[in-house]
Amino acid sequence: MKLMIDEASVVGVYSSDLNLQSAMHNHSVEIRLTGNVTALTVNVEGSLSGNHWGLLASHILSSSEISNKGALFHIESKLVEKIRVRIINYSGTGTVSIWYTPYPN
């Protein structure tokens, strides 16, 4: 598992681009919250070249995910060699950490 964003608390934060060892189809993303986060949306973007990025998934945390201070979701059948994560909506006074791991096809 790779830490992509560590304790961010602002909209627009991008993770560093993660270069996968080989192209992967399936991906898991875990979001962990601290403090009082009241709303969060993240985008997961992928690329084959690193020059052109496309949206793989957008995840809006539900009220139960916010109450539980975390979420786990999976992206399937999206072949990419590079991946990055972006916070596109954030409200509250806590922090957000986002972890990523590819998983076998």
Image (spheres, rainbow, N blue to C red):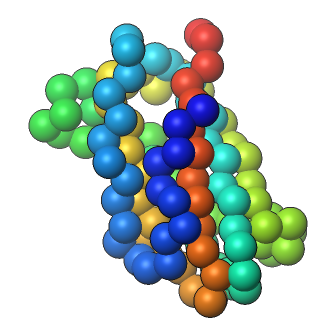
| Quadrant occupied by the C terminus | top right
x, y (%) of residue 36?
A: 72, 85
Q: Residue furthest left?
A: 51
Is the residue 63 above or below the residue 52 in the image? below
Q: Is residue 48 left or right of residue 30?
A: left
Location of residue 33 (image quadrant): bottom right
Mark count = 0
Give the residue at x 61% y 11%: 104
x, y (%) of residue 56?
A: 44, 41
Is the residue 20 above or below the residue 17 in the image? above
Which of the two residues, 47 or 30, is positioned nearer the viewer here?
30
x, y (%) of residue 81?
A: 33, 22
Q: Is residue 55 left or right of residue 89?
A: left
| Quadrant occupied by the N terminus | top right
Give the residue at x 53% y 37%: 2
Residue 100 in view, yes or no: yes
Residue 43 in view, yes or no: no
x, y (%) of residue 30?
A: 66, 47
Give the residue at x 13% y 37%: 51
Give the residue at x 44% y 79%: 10
Is the residue 35 above or below the residue 103 in the image? below
Is the residue 56 above or below the residue 24 in the image? below
Q: Is residue 42 left or right of residue 80?
A: right
